[in-house]
Amino acid sequence: MTIRAPQTDLSQGSQRTAQVAGKPTAGAAAGARPAAAAGDTVTLTATAAELLKLEDSLSGMPDVDRARVAEIKAAIADGSYRVDPEQIVDRLLGIEKELG
């Protein structure tokens, strides 16, 4: 059984996009969004403020513990790195319990 793709001219789509791209949209022409009033304020909830603090504290931490990576890399290289299957199972089961 032979499957054939429809014969389409792919350049038609890009030509149509070029035609439309030059025209402003109705919302842009009419100023769809009014300017914010001078008295507008924003209030964060306690949870949002706490999340911002947490984000700030985490942003200062490195993404990777380079010392731990070097330690594991050396252990793998010299053949002393061992995997504890029971520990892996325990952690996977713990994650499973947390999820559901």
Image: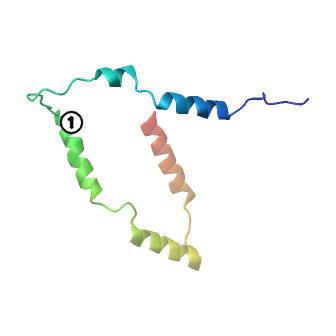
Q: Say which quadrant the N terminus sits in.
A: top right
Does residue 32 appear in this view?
Answer: no
Q: Amino acid at mark 1?
A: Thr
Q: Number of numbered discs present?
A: 1
| Residue drawn where x is 46% and y is 33% of the image | 100
Say left or right for 59 vs 87.
left
Dot 1 alpha-carbon crowd within 10 angstroms: few under 14, some 14 to 19, many 20 or more: few
**Where, by quadrant of the figure, is residue 18 drawn?**
top right
Whether residue 91 is situated above or below residue 16 in the rendered picture: below
Pick the residue in front: 78 or 94: 78
Q: Is residue 31 left or right of residue 5?
A: left
> In the rendered image, is residue 97 in sight?
yes
Q: Position of residue 32 (x, y in %)?
A: 30, 21
**Label 1: element kind:** helix
Measured from the top left, where is residue 24 in percent x and y? 40, 26
Question: Residue 13's x, y, as percent?
Answer: 62, 30
- Pick the front one: 89 or 11: 11
**Residue located 17% across and 34% down the image:** 44
Looking at the image, which is closer to me, 19 or 8? 19
Q: Residue furthest bottom?
A: 78
Residue shown at 46% from the left, 43% from the top: 95
In the image, residue 91 above or below residue 84: above
Left or right of 91 on screen, residue 28:
left
* Residue bearing the label numbered 1: 47
**What residue sits 48% from the left and 31% below the top?**
21
Q: Is residue 19 left or right of residue 49?
A: right
**Is 81 rendered above or below residue 55?**
below
84 or 62, nearer to the observer: 62
